Amino acid sequence: MRYSTRIKPISYLKANAAEVLDNLLEAREPLIITQNGEAKAVIQDIVSYEETQETLALLKILAVGRQEAEAGLVEPMEDVIARLRNGLGKDQ
């Protein structure tokens, strides 16, 4: 995606808000809003935003898992499965 084609000044957003929203829904690409020639905000459709948030949540889970593995805070899979089958928690 070329962001250079997705840059608009805030005055454009103010004058064409409905069109901008329609375009966001159709293109599903973010729009960069400038003010005084500087990028100030990024807007995107809600579906893309929700997908981004879900992806970030999954990446955080993976990062935590990796940190725990590197710190040695892991158990053999067989032990965990056996405990789950027996209905026992970690401390039991």
Image: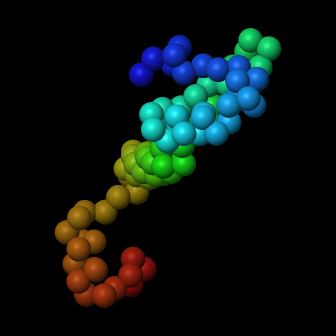
Classify residue 79 by image quadrant: bottom left
Q: 36 or 85, which lies in front?
A: 36
The mark total stands at 0
Task: Tell me, yes or no, if residue 40 can be seen here.
Answer: no
| Residue 15: x %, y % from top left | 73, 29
Task: Tell me, yes or no, if residue 77 can be seen here.
Answer: yes
Relative to 56, does residue 10 appear above or below in the rendering? above
| Residue 50: x %, y % from top left | 50, 51
Asked if residue 27 lies left or right of residue 31, the reply is left
- Work out which residue is located at the far bottom of the displayed protein and give it: 87
Residue at horizontal 25 percent and vertical 63 percent from the top: 76
Classify residue 91 by image quadrant: bottom left
Asked if residue 61 lies left or right of residue 43, the reply is left
Quadrant into which the N terminus falls? top left
Residue at horizontal 52 percent and vertical 34 percent from the top: 23
Relative to 47, does residue 91 appear above or below in the rendering? below
| Residue 51: x %, y % from top left | 45, 48
